[in-house]
Image (cartoon, grey):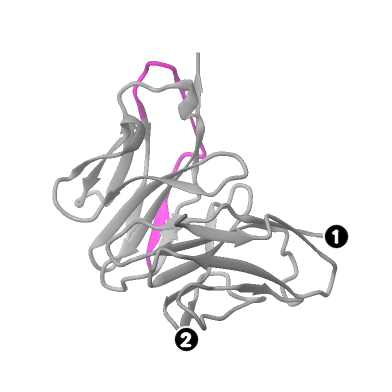
Amino acid sequence: AQSVAQPEDQVNVAEGNPLTVKCTYSVSGNPYLFWYVQYPNRGLQFLLKYITGDNLVKGSYGFEAEFNKSQTSFHLKKPSALVSDSALYFCAVRDTGTASKLTFGTGTRLQVTL
Amino acid sequence: DGGITQSPKYLFRKEGQNVTLSCEQNLNHDAMYWYRQDPGQGLRLIYYSQIVNDFQKGDIAEGYSVSREKKESFPLTVTSAQKNPTAFYLCATADRDTEAFFGQGTRLTVV
């Protein structure tokens, strides 16, 4: 069974500092990996994805993520955090073999302070 | 205006009632999904469908039912067998190599 782990319920960072939100996954085949952000009472907004190719993926709003196959990780990063980045972040995985089932992690709340 | 439309935005259910949440898409995506979101538990997959007239149970399908009679529509019925239905429900669509696109959600409350 495929799964996603986000080990941190909350990450706190000061504005201007780099941020990392961690994600590890488990699938039987090759993964498609995704990061989403959610603001209160809204649906999820797509940030970036890894399908194939370069392990470093760049996405919206200055976010990037690095696919590490040996560690089965896909951590989300940003060089300089903004207060407006404060939100709930979700990592998700889809097994290319099973094509459709899309599994999410439990989410990590990012709090950026001045 | 392309996208995914979930309705209603807010829904109230009495004990013992069935209610149906609507999800319509005009993105021409094959796959559609229903997720339930509770505080601190992330998104849990209820049902998903890869093609018309076919769907699979997700991780928490008990007390829910779906249909996929048209590519554009994937309604979710919350039955009286679902004992704790109060939650935020999200519908999503995707194609094989794309990210999932989400609707704005329906907040269901039992009164």
Q: Amino acid at mark 2?
A: Asn
Q: Is residue B52 above or below residue A7?
A: below
Left or right placement of residue B17 versus residue B39 in this view = right
Disc 2 secondary structure class:
loop
Q: Quadrant of residue A93?
A: bottom left
The magenta region covers A1-19
Q: Nearer the viewer, mark 1 or mark 2?
A: 2
**Which residue ends up furthest to the left in the rendered image?**
A53
Q: What chain letter is assigned to the residue under label 1?
A: B
User: Marks 1/2: CA distance?
Assistant: 33 Å
Q: Is residue A23 above or below residue B12?
A: above
Quadrant, the N terminus of chain A = bottom left
Q: Nearer the viewer, residue A65 or A71?
A: A65
To which residue does mark 1 refer? B111
To which residue does mark 2 refer? B53
Residue B47 drawn in magenta = no
Q: Position of residue B42 (x, y in %)?
A: 54, 52
Disc assigned to residue B40? none
Q: Quadrant of residue B12?
A: bottom right
Disc 1 secondary structure class:
loop
**Residue depicted at x 54% and y 49%:** A43
Marks 1 and 2: CB-CB under 8 Å? no
Of the two numbered discs 1 and 2 on the same chain, state the one appearing first in sequence. 2
